[in-house]
Image: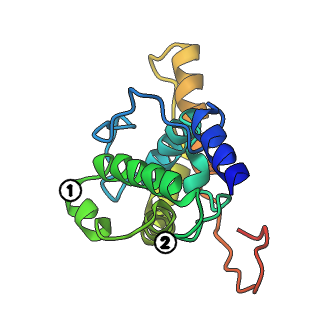
Amino acid sequence: MENRSIHAINLIQDPSSPFYMPPNENPGAIMVSSLLNGENYHSWSRAMSMALKSKHKLQFIDDTLLNPSIDEPSFSMWDRCNTLVISWLTQSIESSIAQSVLWMETTLEIWQDLRERYYQGDIFRIFELFIEIHTYKQGNLSIASYFTHFKGLWQELDNFKLIHACYCVHKCDVA
């Protein structure tokens, strides 16, 4: 039992651990510059993923961190960090959307719900990107400005990858 307690303390003190929380962490922080409004899911999810990665909390949304049972010593650490990330997520989405995820228990549940809701709904944005790429002209723009905008369009389009359904009993890498 003592070994488990020492391991738990190490997880809290290790800055590379997803359970590490510096004293200056703020649950009211807005992690991204643009709130999720339903039309900007791709850019919002990319920005939020980068913000969570910088805080060593990406594992809470990418399904690589096991949710410990309530009787495990790491549960309280997981619960504290999960609650912090939930707060960051809800602070980073518009209030009408936040109300629909407020009562979900885990960050993973919220992340997956938002992804299912908004990821596939961007067929119109894909169409707009194709048209803009096809008709975009340099005009009075400098080469650097033209190239930067054009590259941004292609990168945004590249983010729209089809989500394949997986009905495996075990986890696989289809998605």
Q: Secondary structure at mark 2?
A: helix
Which quadrant of the rendered structure holds the N terminus?
bottom right
Q: Is residue 113 in view from this perspective?
A: yes
In depth, the one of 149 and 35 nearer the eye is 35
Tell me the mark number nearer the camera, choosing from 1 and 2. Answer: 1
* Position of 96 relative to 20 (above/below): below
Q: Residue at x 44, y 70 (%)?
A: 113
Q: Residue at x 68, y 51 (%)?
A: 2
Work out whether mark 1 precedes mark 2 in sequence or the reverse, and give the earlier one: 1
- Residue 156 on image: x %, y %: 56, 45
Looking at this rendering, what residue extends furthest in the front direction? 2
In depth, the one of 65 and 164 nearer the eye is 65
- Residue 66 on image: x %, y %: 64, 63
Q: Residue at x 39, y 54 (%)?
A: 83
Q: Is residue 128 in view from this perspective?
A: no
- Residue 137 on image: x %, y %: 51, 31
Q: Amino acid at mark 1?
A: Ser
Q: Residue at x 53, y 60 (%)?
A: 75
Which quadrant of the rendered structure holds the C terminus?
bottom right
Q: Secondary structure at mark 1?
A: helix
In depth, the one of 48 and 157 nearer the eye is 48
- Mark-to-mark CA distance, 1 and 2: 19 Å
Q: Is residue 21 left or right of residue 7?
A: left
Q: Dots 1 and 2: beta carbons under 8 Å?
A: no
- Residue 139 on image: x %, y %: 47, 22
The residue carrying mark 2 is: 116
The residue carrying mark 1 is: 95
